[in-house]
Amino acid sequence: MYQPIESVTFDSMPNAVSKLMKEVDEMKEMLQTIAERVGRPQKQWMSVQDLIEYLPGKPARQTIYSWIWKKTIPYHKAGAKLQFLKSEIDAWILGKDNSDDDDEVVIRVPVKARPITPKKGGRK
Protein backbone atom coordinates (compact mmCIF):
# COMPACT_ATOMS: atom_id res chain seq x y z
CA MET A 1 0.00 0.00 0.00
CA TYR A 2 2.50 2.57 1.12
CA GLN A 3 5.14 3.39 -1.41
CA PRO A 4 8.04 5.64 -0.57
CA ILE A 5 7.76 8.98 -2.28
CA GLU A 6 10.35 9.66 -4.90
CA SER A 7 11.96 13.00 -4.83
CA VAL A 8 9.48 15.55 -6.09
CA THR A 9 10.69 18.20 -8.44
CA PHE A 10 8.93 21.29 -9.64
CA ASP A 11 8.07 19.56 -12.92
CA SER A 12 6.65 16.43 -11.24
CA MET A 13 4.60 18.40 -8.68
CA PRO A 14 1.26 18.25 -10.60
CA ASN A 15 1.51 14.44 -10.88
CA ALA A 16 2.40 14.07 -7.19
CA VAL A 17 -0.54 16.27 -6.11
CA SER A 18 -2.88 14.34 -8.40
CA LYS A 19 -1.70 11.05 -6.90
CA LEU A 20 -2.17 12.37 -3.36
CA MET A 21 -5.70 13.59 -4.14
CA LYS A 22 -6.58 10.17 -5.53
CA GLU A 23 -5.25 8.42 -2.41
CA VAL A 24 -7.11 10.82 -0.12
CA ASP A 25 -10.36 10.09 -2.00
CA GLU A 26 -9.77 6.33 -1.57
CA MET A 27 -9.18 6.81 2.16
CA LYS A 28 -12.37 8.88 2.46
CA GLU A 29 -14.36 6.08 0.84
CA MET A 30 -12.84 3.48 3.16
CA LEU A 31 -13.54 5.61 6.24
CA GLN A 32 -17.12 6.23 5.13
CA THR A 33 -17.66 2.49 4.65
CA ILE A 34 -16.26 1.77 8.11
CA ALA A 35 -18.36 4.54 9.69
CA GLU A 36 -21.53 3.16 8.10
CA ARG A 37 -20.73 -0.33 9.36
CA VAL A 38 -19.99 0.89 12.89
CA GLY A 39 -22.94 3.30 12.97
CA ARG A 40 -25.39 0.55 12.13
CA PRO A 41 -26.22 -1.27 15.36
CA GLN A 42 -26.18 -5.03 15.05
CA LYS A 43 -29.03 -6.95 16.63
CA GLN A 44 -27.63 -9.15 19.32
CA TRP A 45 -29.85 -12.03 20.34
CA MET A 46 -29.54 -13.85 23.65
CA SER A 47 -30.82 -17.19 24.86
CA VAL A 48 -32.30 -17.70 28.33
CA GLN A 49 -28.88 -18.77 29.63
CA ASP A 50 -27.19 -15.75 28.01
CA LEU A 51 -29.82 -13.52 29.63
CA ILE A 52 -29.20 -15.03 33.06
CA GLU A 53 -25.48 -14.32 32.71
CA TYR A 54 -26.12 -10.79 31.40
CA LEU A 55 -28.62 -9.57 33.99
CA PRO A 56 -27.40 -8.10 37.27
CA GLY A 57 -27.95 -10.48 40.15
CA LYS A 58 -27.93 -13.54 37.86
CA PRO A 59 -31.62 -14.43 38.40
CA ALA A 60 -32.73 -18.07 38.38
CA ARG A 61 -34.10 -19.62 35.18
CA GLN A 62 -37.54 -19.94 36.82
CA THR A 63 -37.49 -16.21 37.59
CA ILE A 64 -36.94 -15.45 33.89
CA TYR A 65 -39.87 -17.70 32.96
CA SER A 66 -41.99 -15.99 35.61
CA TRP A 67 -41.23 -12.58 34.07
CA ILE A 68 -42.13 -13.97 30.65
CA TRP A 69 -45.41 -15.40 31.96
CA LYS A 70 -46.25 -12.04 33.58
CA LYS A 71 -45.13 -10.24 30.36
CA THR A 72 -42.83 -7.95 32.32
CA ILE A 73 -39.72 -8.65 30.25
CA PRO A 74 -39.41 -8.16 26.46
CA TYR A 75 -38.95 -11.46 24.64
CA HIS A 76 -39.43 -13.09 21.25
CA LYS A 77 -40.34 -16.63 20.32
CA ALA A 78 -38.81 -18.40 17.37
CA GLY A 79 -40.85 -21.58 17.28
CA ALA A 80 -40.43 -23.04 20.76
CA LYS A 81 -37.20 -21.13 21.40
CA LEU A 82 -37.20 -17.99 23.53
CA GLN A 83 -34.92 -15.17 22.44
CA PHE A 84 -34.12 -11.80 23.92
CA LEU A 85 -32.87 -8.76 22.04
CA LYS A 86 -30.00 -7.14 23.97
CA SER A 87 -31.07 -3.57 23.14
CA GLU A 88 -34.60 -4.26 24.45
CA ILE A 89 -33.23 -5.84 27.62
CA ASP A 90 -30.97 -2.82 28.18
CA ALA A 91 -33.96 -0.50 27.80
CA TRP A 92 -36.01 -2.72 30.13
CA ILE A 93 -33.28 -2.66 32.81
CA LEU A 94 -33.07 1.13 32.57
CA GLY A 95 -36.85 1.40 32.76
CA LYS A 96 -37.29 3.05 29.38
CA ASP A 97 -40.61 2.63 27.64
CA ASN A 98 -39.40 3.36 24.06
CA SER A 99 -40.83 6.88 24.23
CA ASP A 100 -38.73 9.96 23.55
CA ASP A 101 -38.83 11.10 27.19
CA ASP A 102 -35.18 11.19 28.16
CA ASP A 103 -35.73 13.66 30.99
CA GLU A 104 -35.37 11.05 33.72
CA VAL A 105 -33.54 7.76 33.66
CA VAL A 106 -34.77 5.21 36.15
CA ILE A 107 -32.50 2.28 36.81
CA ARG A 108 -34.57 -0.80 37.52
CA VAL A 109 -32.74 -3.83 38.78
CA PRO A 110 -34.76 -7.03 38.40
CA VAL A 111 -35.49 -8.89 41.60
CA LYS A 112 -36.49 -12.50 42.05
CA ALA A 113 -40.17 -13.18 41.65
CA ARG A 114 -42.20 -14.11 44.71
CA PRO A 115 -42.56 -17.88 44.96
CA ILE A 116 -45.96 -19.16 43.98
CA THR A 117 -47.63 -20.85 46.93
CA PRO A 118 -50.15 -23.60 46.20
CA LYS A 119 -53.76 -22.79 47.01
CA LYS A 120 -55.20 -24.48 50.02
CA GLY A 121 -58.18 -26.69 49.71
CA GLY A 122 -59.17 -28.43 46.56
CA ARG A 123 -60.66 -31.84 45.86
CA LYS A 124 -61.53 -34.15 48.69
Image: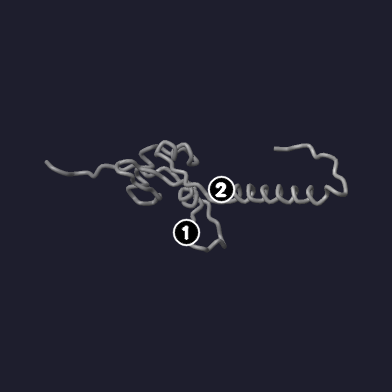
The circle on residue 98 is 1
What is the quadrant of residue 46 in the picture?
top left
Label 2, on which residue? 37
Task: Name the residue furthest left.
Answer: 124
CA separation, marks 1 and 2?
24 Å
Q: In the rendered image, which quarter contains the N terminus?
A: top right
Q: In the rendered image, which quarter contains the C terminus?
A: top left
What residue is shown at x 47% (from left), y 47% (from top)? 43
- x and y, in percent, of residue 47 in the image: 40, 39
Question: Do tag 1 and tag 2 residues touch (Cβ < 8 Å)?
Answer: no
Residue type at the position of mark 1: Asn
Marks counted in the figure total 2
Residue type at the position of mark 2: Arg
- Which of labels 1 and 2 is toward the front? 2
Describe the element under mark 1 as helix, strand or loop.
loop
Task: Using the image, determine if residue 70 lies above or below residue 48.
Answer: below
What residue is shown at x 82% (from left), y 39% (from top)? 6
Of 83 and 119, the residue lying toward us: 83
Of 35 and 105, the residue lying toward us: 35
What residue is shown at x 47% (from left), y 44% (from top)? 44
- x and y, in percent, of residue 112 in the image: 41, 42
- x and y, in percent, of residue 48 in the image: 39, 39
Describe the element under mark 2 as helix, strand or loop.
helix
What residue is shown at x 35% (from left), y 42% (from top)? 82
Q: How is the image coloured?
A: one colour
Q: Is residue 123 left or right of residue 90?
A: left
